Image (cartoon, rainbow, N blue to C red):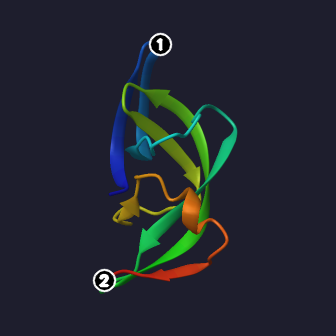
Amino acid sequence: MAKRGDLQLATGWLKDVIYIEKPELCACGPNTEWTLFVLDADGRSATQVKAHFGQSAGNFVEVQRGLKAGDRVIVSDMAAYHEYRNIDLR
């Protein structure tokens, strides 16, 4: 889930940022972009979005654009579904 809060880096703190657990296989780093799926409100489907990342700390990465706090994100490997804008979950 995308969270809003403070993220501790080796060089200091990022205050009041949106961050998520690093997605599987993601080379997440400053100024990178990654395609993620965000669960819809009912949890039965997911929509593809592009997330733009900033700094990372441990298993977490700052999201600069593409997600909002509270978004439920699929962080497992979704490469097989890259061509689909929306997917149904069962």
Element marked by disc 2: loop
- Amino acid tagged 1: Thr
Label 1 packing within 10 angstroms: few (<14), some (14-19), many (20+): few
Residue at 68% of width from left, 40% of height from top? 32
Q: Earlier in the sequence, mark 1 or mark 2?
A: 1
Viewer-nearest residue: 71 or 69 = 71
Label 2 packing within 10 angstroms: few (<14), some (14-19), many (20+): few
**From the viewer's perspective, is 18 left or right of 66?**
left
Element marked by disc 1: loop
Report the residue marked by disc 1: 11
Question: Nearer the viewer's eye, disc 1 or disc 2?
Answer: 2
- Amino acid tagged 2: Arg
Residue at 59% of width from left, 43% of height from top? 53
Report the residue marked by disc 2: 90
Q: Position of residue 14 (x, y in %)?
A: 45, 31
Say above or below: 50 vs 11: below
Image quarter of the N terminus = bottom left
Say above or below: 8 vs 85: above
Residue at 47% of width from left, 13% of height from top? 11
